[in-house]
Image (tube, grey):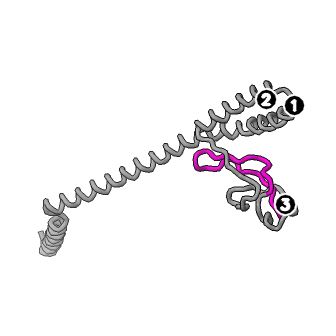
Amino acid sequence: MSTEENIKEEEINNTESETQVEENQEVVEDVLTPEELIQVEKDKYLRLFAEFENYKKRTSKERIELFRTAGQDLMTSMLPIMDDFDRGLAEIKKAKDKELLKGMQLISDKLKKTLEQKGLTIMEVRAGDAFNADIHEAITQIPAPTDKLKGKVIDCIESGYKLGDKIIRYPKVVIGQ
């Protein structure tokens, strides 16, 4: 072998050994003490546990909300039937047949009581109540009979209903101008 080849081989060996020394130093620096390793693992565990707890809370809230409003479609479809009952009762009251009125009143009360047990409540609106656009739906405005009724509810055309805390139908009202 020539001296040039020997020199090149020595340079290659020196470069390789320098690289190995650097790698060994990096490995030594990357190795954590057992206490540090335990702390890192504890931190990972706590983060994972907190994330799981948040997931459980979120899914339970979603489940409760689903159960609370599960019957909303059914309730919404029953509201026109309740309105028809109310209109029918108003007409029967004009008639002379009191037995028919009693029978229809019993059926109407039973229907309302059953829906109330499922969470449906009627929103009470009276003449003279202050108009609130958040909870009332104004159908029309008419001249107020007195100055006291300006901007207030004069008549409720259609009842409003809540299912739990959520309004599923706003009361339709006439307001004074």
Left or right side of 74 for 95: right
How packed mark 2 is, by other alpha carbons closer than 10 Å (few <14, some 14-19, many 20 or more), is some
**How many marks are shown on the rendered structure?**
3
List x then y, in percent, for residue 22: 17, 70
Which residue is at 13% across, 59% downward?
34
Residue annotated with mark 1 = 95
Identify which amino acid the numbered label 3 is placed on: Gln
Q: Looking at the image, tell me whether mark 3 or mark 1 is earlier in sequence order.
A: 1
- Label 3's element? strand
List x then y, in percent, for residue 36: 17, 63
Q: Image height check: is 152 above or below 119?
A: below
Q: Nearer the viewer, residue 114 or 101?
A: 101
Circle 1/circle 2 CB separation < 8 Å:
yes
Q: Which region of the structure is painted magenta?
A: 154-177
Which residue is at 20% across, 60% downward?
39
Q: Looking at the image, tell me whether mark 1 or mark 2 is earlier in sequence order.
A: 1
- Label 2's element? helix
Using the image, tell me which numbered label, if any, was put on residue 101. 2
**Residue 16 seen in render:** no
Which residue is at 76% across, 55% downward?
127
As measured in the structure, the alpha-carbon distance from the residue carrying label 3 to the one carrying label 1 is 32 Å
Q: Looking at the image, tell me whether mark 3 or mark 2 is earlier in sequence order.
A: 2
